[in-house]
Image: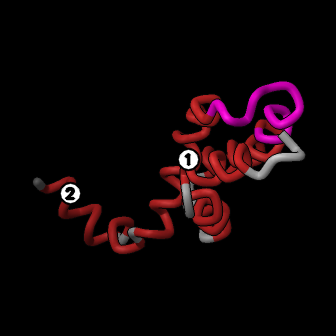
Amino acid sequence: NWSAWVPTAQVVLVFGALWVLAFLGAKAGGPAMLRRALWLVPPYVALHYVVARVGEVRLFLPLAPVLIPLSWWVLFPDARRPEAESRGAAS
């Protein structure tokens, strides 16, 4: 896992830019539960680099419920405004 670049490229390509956007979403004040769960991502990735075949990208799919919402927190800031919430509740 450490000597070849292909497994690392596969891991990065699984979620693409969402890896970075999730950490930006945590700094932008994302939901507290997701910010706490984000602390588990680096140990999870490191553990899989040590004991698993990183080329098996499906091992990283359990990170999707944390990475995707936090990255959307950055990508769609208008969706979390109060008037957007009131329109969603009224319809």
Range drawn in magenta: 45-56
In-front residue for pair 53/31:
53
Residue 26: give x, y in percent of width and height. Answer: 64, 61
Q: For residue 47, which quarter of the picture?
A: top right
In-front residue for pair 21/46:
46
Secondary element type, mark 2: helix
52 over 40 or under it: above or below:
above
46 over 90 or under it: above or below:
above
In-front residue for pair 21/8:
8
**Residue 1 included in the magenta stretch of the image:** no
39 over 62 or under it: above or below:
below
Q: Which mark is residue 88?
A: 2
Mark 1 and mark 2 lie on one chain; the one further toward the N terminus is 1
Residue 6: give x, y in percent of width and height. Answer: 71, 48
Distance Cα–Cα, label 1 vs label 2: 31 Å
Q: Amino acid at mark 2?
A: Gly
Whether residue 81 sits left or right of residue 39 in the image: it is left
Colouring scheme, one of rainbow, by chain, secondary structure, one colour: secondary structure
Provide the residue designation for mark 1: 14
Q: Amino acid at mark 1?
A: Val
Residue for point 64% across, 30% down: 56
Secondary element type, mark 1: helix
